[in-house]
Image (cartoon, helix red, strand yellow):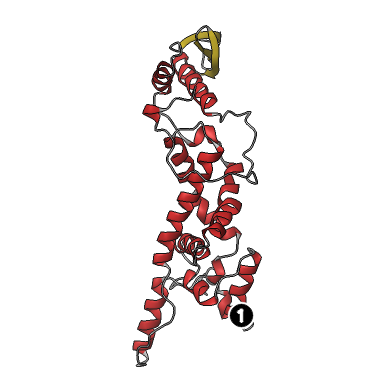
């Protein structure tokens, strides 16, 4: 009886006869509307494991070790991540001037997270260009290559090119992000109390507006938060306590200008990035 085997492992495109790596690098850069030196672009996609594998292979074959012109992408990846983070946070501060710095950093962290960058790297066709020991390349390798590519765009004092890339490919993913949920504030009612007091407003007063089926599994309660006898926000919840915290969170979102009814952020608006941190939550005065 023949042994049962699965499908063969995926073969890298570099194993095909028509594979032309310099042409693929040029095409990748052109698709993104960029022009990057080929040697620098090779470094973007060269993992340290690949260089080590090449060195061990030469040793196995008894070939003399030679100096390679291509370095690995580790250093570029570090600079690229720092650049993406600074560009994204600076743009968000300009687009959301009423949001405290903790919120800016929470949204920035989400946009530059491993999962978001990995999805972006796949979508712009990086997988087949990575030079690594393993195939297909690891998720970490793909993310490093993307970060390294951003760093190359800022070479030669052309940071504006990197900023445009971050805007067009990283910040554009804001369409899939719920800004009001990207930053989870603990004890929102306590935070709202401090903020309103700091701004000279009346302290929040939770009031039960409506309640249905309080003694059933489908209980629903709607709590409103009042300040200076005016309704600031309301929200439903399975319990009064839950509805109160959600209403307080809704009130904070209104103060930050990121409610569910807020218009999408205009990526093409003429905004100068704000490098200085926004007010921290303990000092935040939105009113």
Tell which of 116 and 13 is nearer to you.
Answer: 116
Tell which of 102 and 59 is nearer to you.
Answer: 102
Q: How many marks?
A: 1
| Residue at the disc numbered 1 | 19
Give coordinates of residue 174: x percent, y percent. 58, 43
Write the residue at 46% across / 45% down.
275
Give coordinates of residue 172: x percent, y percent. 60, 48
Write the residue at 42% across / 33% down.
279
Q: Quadrant of residue 254?
A: top right
Give coordinates of residue 244: x percent, y percent. 47, 16
Give coordinates of residue 123: x percent, y percent. 60, 58
Q: Residue furthest top?
A: 229
Write the residue at 42% across / 40% down.
277
Write the residue at 57% across / 56% down.
165
Tell which of 188 and 56 is nearer to you.
Answer: 188
Q: Is residue 283 above or below residue 196?
A: below
Label 1 environment density (alpha carbons within 10 Å; few <14, some 14–19, many ≥20): few
């Amino acid at each position: 009886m023949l042994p049962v085997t699965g499908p063969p492992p995926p073969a890298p495109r570099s194993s095909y006869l028509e594979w032309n790596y310099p042409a693929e690098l040029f095409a990748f850069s052109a698709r993104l509307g960029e022009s990057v030196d080929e040697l620098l672009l090779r470094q973007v996609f060269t993992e340290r494991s690949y260089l080590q594998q090449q060195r061990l292979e030469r040793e196995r074959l008894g070939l003399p070790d030679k100096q390679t012109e291509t370095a690995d992408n580790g250093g570029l990846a570090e600079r690229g991540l720092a650049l993406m983070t600074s560009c994204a946070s600076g743009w968000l501060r300009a687009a959301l001037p009423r949001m405290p710095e903790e919120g800016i950093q929470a949204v920035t962290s989400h946009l530059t997270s491993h999962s978001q960058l990995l999805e972006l790297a796949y979508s712009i066709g990086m997988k087949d260009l990575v030079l690594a020991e393993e195939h297909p390349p690891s998720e970490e390798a793909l993310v490093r290559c993307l970060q390294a590519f951003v760093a190359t765009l800022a070479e030669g004092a052309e940071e504006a090119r990197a900023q445009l890339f971050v805007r067009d490919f990283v910040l554009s993913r804001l369409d899939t992000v719920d800004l009001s949920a990207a930053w989870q504030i603990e004890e929102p009612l306590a935070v709202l109390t401090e903020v309103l007091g700091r701004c000279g407003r009346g302290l929040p007063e939770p009031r039960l507006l409506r309640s249905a089926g309080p003694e059933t599994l489908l209980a629903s309660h709607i709590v409103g938060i009042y300040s200076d006898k005016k309704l600031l926000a309301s929200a439903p919840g399975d319990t009064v306590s839950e509805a109160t915290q959600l209403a307080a969170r809704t009130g904070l979102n209104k103060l930050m200008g990121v409610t569910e009814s807020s218009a999408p952020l205009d990526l093409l608006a003429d905004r100068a990035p704000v490098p200085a941190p926004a007010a921290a939550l303990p000092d935040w005065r939105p009113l």
